[in-house]
């Protein structure tokens, strides 16, 4: 497995692979990899001849007061995990390699990105769409792999690929959790021992909502309120949002009759964590 830092070198490697008739999978990440990322890489390896994992803390998707400078990084450990998972290349560019100093072109959308995380992070998805478009243009993969953990991101990327005619199959992968239910996240390292325990409230509350839907509840407000009420039993949790939205267009729903996404963002101390479940009440 190779660590590549320049766009030019990565392009020449992909060109070589294409000459050999190989298919190419891409797994975009911000590094500090864990089992959640690994599940995406393993799936990509099983479905493509060659796999690129991008490992880049993308500055344009962080707001001014967010954790860009403190975001955890460990490229050596990431290299070992990628190797073990069977990836062929880690693309680990410097910010200057990815963005010209006078960069002035961005990819944005005026739906799907305004609600949920977009309310507190108004510039986030523009940064995501921009960097993912750039990675798509650099790697030209056949398939790209994204986690359901970032459900809004996955819906946004699917829409961008449709609208911009990227000839790339987007593969969504299930959320990987710790044994006690906490969704794996690079940001979990910010949590103190006490906060780590408190963070279980996200999955516990969502599970309660999911059970309500499974037992036949169709009123979205009732499910949302039950989730919220349970979240509020945890003193260290400050809820940013709990929303029940249409799984595809992310518009809020009143009745749970089509596939929905129930998503939440919660501050545990200073750490903002997200989690969600999706379900199709017709099944
Ligand atoms: P990140 O490095 O946080 O930007 O995540 C890179 C990719 O890994 C995204 O597509 C995430 O949705 C996915 N991912 C992160 N955590 C998990 C998890 N616990 N389970 C599944 N996928 C995940």
Image (tube, grey):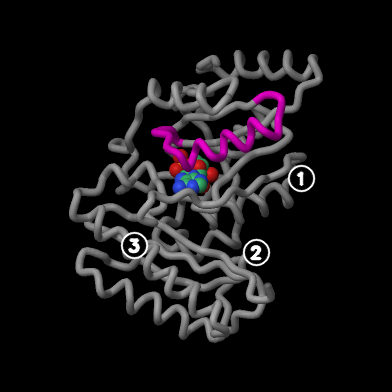
| Residue at the image point whose x is 55% and y is 29% from the top | 53
Question: Which of 78 and 71 lies nearest the eye of the viewer?
Answer: 78
Q: Judge whether 162 appears above or below 12 on screen.
A: below
Quadrant of the frame with the N terminus: top right
Along the horizontal axis of the image, is 190 left or right of 164?
left
**Could you say which quadrant of the image residue 248 lies in?**
bottom right
Disc 3 residue crowd, few under 14, some 14–19, many 20+, Cα 10 Å: many
| Residue at the image point whose x is 28% and y is 52% from the top | 271
Separation of marks 2 and 1 at Cα, in angstroms? 18 Å
- For ligand 1, tell me if the residue under mark 1 lies within 8 Å: no
Separation of marks 3 and 1 at Cα, in angstroms? 35 Å
Element class at badge 2 = loop
Query: Is residue 40 highlighted in magenta?
Result: yes
**Residues at marks 2 and 1 touching, judged by CB atoms closer than 8 Å:** no
Q: Which residues are magenta?
A: 30-50
Question: Which of 136 and 45 lies nearest the eye of the viewer?
Answer: 45
Along the horizontal axis of the image, is 192 left or right of 77?
left
**Residues at marks 3 and 1 touching, judged by CB atoms closer than 8 Å:** no
Q: Residue 248 — which label?
A: 2
Q: Which residue is mark 3?
A: 266
Element class at badge 3 = strand
**Residues at marks 2 and 3 touching, judged by CB atoms closer than 8 Å:** no
The number of numbered discs placed on residues in the rendered structure image is: 3
Residue 127 visible? The answer is no
- For ligand 1, tell me if the residue under mark 2 lies within 8 Å: no
Separation of marks 2 and 3 at Cα, in angstroms? 23 Å
Q: Which residue is mark 1?
A: 165
Quadrant of the frame with the C terminus: bottom right
**Could you say which quadrant of the image residue 2 lies in?**
top right
Estimate the x, y position of residue 98 in percent, counting from the top left. 52, 27
Estimate the x, y position of residue 96 in percent, counting from the top left. 46, 24
């Amino acid at each position: 497995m190779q660590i590549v830092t320049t766009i030019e070198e990565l392009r020449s490697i992909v060109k070589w692979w294409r000459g050999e008739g190989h298919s190419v999978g891409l797994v975009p990440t911000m590094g500090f990899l864990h089992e959640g990322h690994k599940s995406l890489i393993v799936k990509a390896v099983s479905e493509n001849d060659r796999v690129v994992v991008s490992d880049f803390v993308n500055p344009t998707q962080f707001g001014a007061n967010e954790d860009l400078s403190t975001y955890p990084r460990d490229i050596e450990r990431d290299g070992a995990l990628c190797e073990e998972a069977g990836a062929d290349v880690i693309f680990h560019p410097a910010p200057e390699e990815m963005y010209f100093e006078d960069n002035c072109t961005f990819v944005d959308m005026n739906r799907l990105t305004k609600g949920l995380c977009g309310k507190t992070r108004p510039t986030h998805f523009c940064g995501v769409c921009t960097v993912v478009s750039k990675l798509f243009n650099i790697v030209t993969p056949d398939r790209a792999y994204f986690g359901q953990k970032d459900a809004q991101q996955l819906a946004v990327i699917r829409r961008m690929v449709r609208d911009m005619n990227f000839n790339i199959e987007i593969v969504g992968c299930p959320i990987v959790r710790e044994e006690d239910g906490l969704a794996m996240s690079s940001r979990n390292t910010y949590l103190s021992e006490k906060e780590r325990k408190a963070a279980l409230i996200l999955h516990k509350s969502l599970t309660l909502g999911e059970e309500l839907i499974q037992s036949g509840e169709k009123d979205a407000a009732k499910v949302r309120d039950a989730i919220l009420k349970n979240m509020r039993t945890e003193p260290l949790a400050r809820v940013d949002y709990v929303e029940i939205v249409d799984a595809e267009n992310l518009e809020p729903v009143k009745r749970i009759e089509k596939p929905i996404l129930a998503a939440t963002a919660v501050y545990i101390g200073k750490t903002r964590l997200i989690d969600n479940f999706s379900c199709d009440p017709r099944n």
